Amino acid sequence: MTTQTQIIDSRFLRKYVKRFLPNSQAVALAIILIVSFVLIYSLSDLLMPVFISIVLAYLLEGLVAKAESIKMPRLPAVCLVFSVFIACFIFLLFYLIPIASQQAIELVQHLPEIIHSAENEIMRLPEMYPQLISEIKVRQMLYAVEKDLLTYVQNTLSRSAASVMGLVSVMIYLFLVPMMVFFFLKDKQILVSWFLQFMPKDRHLTVRVWEEVDVQIGNYIRGKFAEVFILWAVSYVTYAAMGLNYAMLLAVLMGLQVIIPYVGATLVTFPVLGVAYFQWGLGGDEFMYIVIAYSIIQMLDGVVLVPVLFSEAVNLHAISIIVAILFFGGLWGFWGVFLAIPLATVVKAVLTAWPRIGDENPNTSY
């Protein structure tokens, strides 16, 4: 009896394994995915500069390939692209970040005035709509908001004080990351050949999946950087020309909001319209001009930039995007959010290319 039960269990286990691993190529792909995930997840804190460098090198590789397509040798192409990268890095580090940081400090310093003005406006609600809300409820709500805001500011200051010790690490990253990006680009063939010797020989399915997602991920990352830059530039020129306070800070937020699909556009609306409201009030024409300009920028992003920059990207359902953002963002923070859609694209490509039961000649189909 026990023997028969063991035989039935063994057959069931073999069927179950065969359902998910129908051939050796699927086994190789599964091993590669599992090992890659475990290594990245377990070593993300230690090797984050390496992972960042790989992402940046992958981003720049498309530009190097375009330079090589016009008969430019590999090394001069790498040097040219890397020089442009360093120029953008210096601009970001010594111009954009200091201005945005200074405006953020100024905004924090003016927060008490903004909060006091907001309280005065909110306290008018019981007079205007006494049947909907009472003064006691409004005061309770304001007290809760002030308490939470105070706690948040204190926690932020505590983290800022604790992060002073990490300043040395940041400086090391600023030196190591560009250096590693250069060598990843320069010695790409050597590094790829060294890496492939540790891969399973029967990896045709893995190559098929990689070829399917390579173009899509590259287009997505490069398109996302281009979208961030264009939105930042257009927003800054618009807000500065209209005299909006904290134009650089708000423009940076406008650029970064595209990193989080759907949610980012909603979140950035509050600081932009909030600053315009406290600067001019609802009665001024300037506030309406800001609302119109903000709406036009968001519309152009959705109607023009996204179709042009991401025309070759795989369409994912909104639920898939939200789940990917929550999952990968919870694992790897900012970079998980930024790479959520490419990683979701990888998952979709794996599921699409995965061999099904009943496929003819599964070991030779790929």
Image: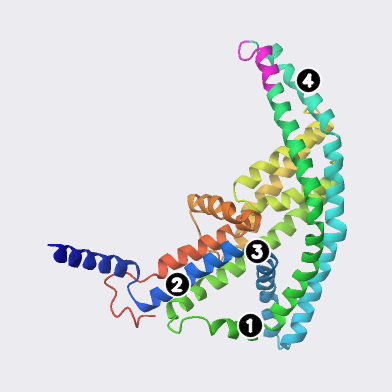
The CA distance from mark 1 to mark 3 is 26 Å
**Other residues around mark 3 within 10 Å, as few (<14) / some (14–19) / many (≥20):** many
Residue 76 position in % (x across, y down): 77, 85
- Asked whether the beta carbons under mark 3 and mark 2 sit within 8 Å of each other, the answer is no
Of mark 4 and mark 3, the one earlier in the sequence is 4
The CA distance from mark 3 to mark 2 is 31 Å
- Under circle 4, the secondary element is helix
Q: Which residue is mark 2?
A: 31
Provide the major secondary structure of the magenta segment. Answer: helix
Q: Which residues are magenta?
A: 131-142
Specify the quadrant of the image occupied by residue 355: bottom left
Residue depicted at x 67% and y 84%: 69
The CA distance from mark 4 to mark 1 is 63 Å
**From the viewer's perspective, is 326 left or right of 129?**
left
Specify the quadrant of the image occupied by residue 169: bottom right
Residue depicted at x 44% and y 67%: 350
Q: Which residue is mark 3?
A: 223
* One can see residue 44 in this view: yes
Quarter the N terminus occupies? bottom left
Quarter the C terminus occupies? bottom left
The CA distance from mark 4 to mark 3 is 44 Å
**Other residues around mark 2 within 10 Å, as few (<14) / some (14–19) / many (≥20):** some
Residue 252 position in % (x across, y down): 77, 51
Residue depicted at x 78% and y 48%: 162
Q: Which residue is mark 4?
A: 120
Q: Which residue is mark 1?
A: 191
| Total numbered badges shown on the rendered structure | 4
- Under circle 2, the secondary element is helix
* Three-letter code, disc 1: Leu
